[in-house]
Amino acid sequence: MLDKTNLKDCASQHLKPGSIRDMEALFSFVLEAENPKTQLISIDERWYRNDLEKAFQPGELEKLRRSFANGELVGVRFPIDIVRKDGKIEKTEVRGYLKKPAQLSRGQDYYVRSGITVPQESKFGHRNALGLLIADAPAISAFLGDAENPAHTLWIGNAEKVQRNYKGAKDRVTAIKKCLVNLHDLLAQAVEEKAEEALLYFFWTPGTGARPRQGKGEKTLLPTTPPATSPELFQISPIDGGFTVHPRKGLTADRLPLRASIKVAYDVEEGNPFRLWSEYDFNFEKKGDACIETHEVDVTCANNTLNCTFNKPESKISVTGLDSNRDLIIKVEVEVEEEQ
């Protein structure tokens, strides 16, 4: 009989090496999280309405940050009230677990409702940690079950069934979907090392304070003026859960139509955000990952890129449905046609 005591041995025996990424660390993490003796911290039940950081008692968050930075398992109870259409309130919870093992090749996060894994909710990508969200209490399981798509791969806050049966469903589903990522980002602040003066010498300019100390034998680097850039042709404006791109006033009809690619990624603390983009963040080719509205724009989607043709000065493309708790990096590259 296959169970948690022999699952890893069976996987090692029957699967090809590398089929399960970081298998030893992953199995150890899940077993530790499911251990009844694992301690969890309960936070204020208003966590999903306010800033998550304010939901912790004084000193608790720093303790969790130290544990996470040391590679220890951390667990948090996220209490939440579910309100049915008849006004009945049910108090329930989801549980979140995080761990940052040494030598982890890539982050992995799993979302489980009463034994059912919801794979399209995974979104760690470049977050180099393991995460597990468990929703197994009857009330929260029924609630999230109503929010699942028919394939049981995604939780949708405005799904017909959950909207029909509950009040305030969208806000609660969204909060549950994001709580593990938000917790990770809150704890990871202690892991990232700051080197505020590491590049001070190279970027120092007169009038910005004392000049950094120069090492013996080092040459003085004179500040240089960066080369002038050509005027930007497009305006990028942030909106709730996304952005809008449209031509600036200087882009007149005689220069249109104009082709451009819009590349989008979530910002990261280290590395190139576009190289670290993951399909688990979002994928414009997948239905439901984002809402794209256009006016006088022809568009085709490719992963995290929108290939657009702007036909008129009033052309506009808007994208919503992205994670409003994360910073977006947006790059517009204009296709320049070679002269014949």
Image (cartoon, helix red, strand yellow):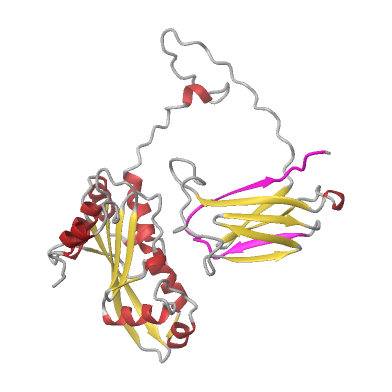
Q: Please state if 149 lies on the left or on the right of 320 as rendered.
A: left
Quarter of the figure with residue 299: bottom right
Q: Is residue 53 visible?
A: no
State the residue in front, 42 or 276.
276
- Residue 213 lies, with reference to residue 78, above or below; the image says above
- Residue farthest toward the bottom in the current orientation of the protein: 86
State the residue in front, 55 or 336.
336
Q: Please state if 39 lies on the left or on the right of 83 as rendered.
A: left
Quarter of the figure with residue 42: bottom left
Q: Is residue 99 magenta?
A: no
Percent position of residue 109, x then y: 33, 59
Total numbered labels:
0
Q: Which residue is found at the position 36% from the left and 89% from the top?
A: 88
- Residue 184 lies, with reference to residue 118, above or below; the image says above
Percent position of residue 115, x then y: 27, 74
Percent position of residue 56, x then y: 30, 60
Percent position of residue 4, x then y: 16, 66
Quarter of the figure with residue 53: bottom left
Q: Is residue 321 magenta?
A: yes
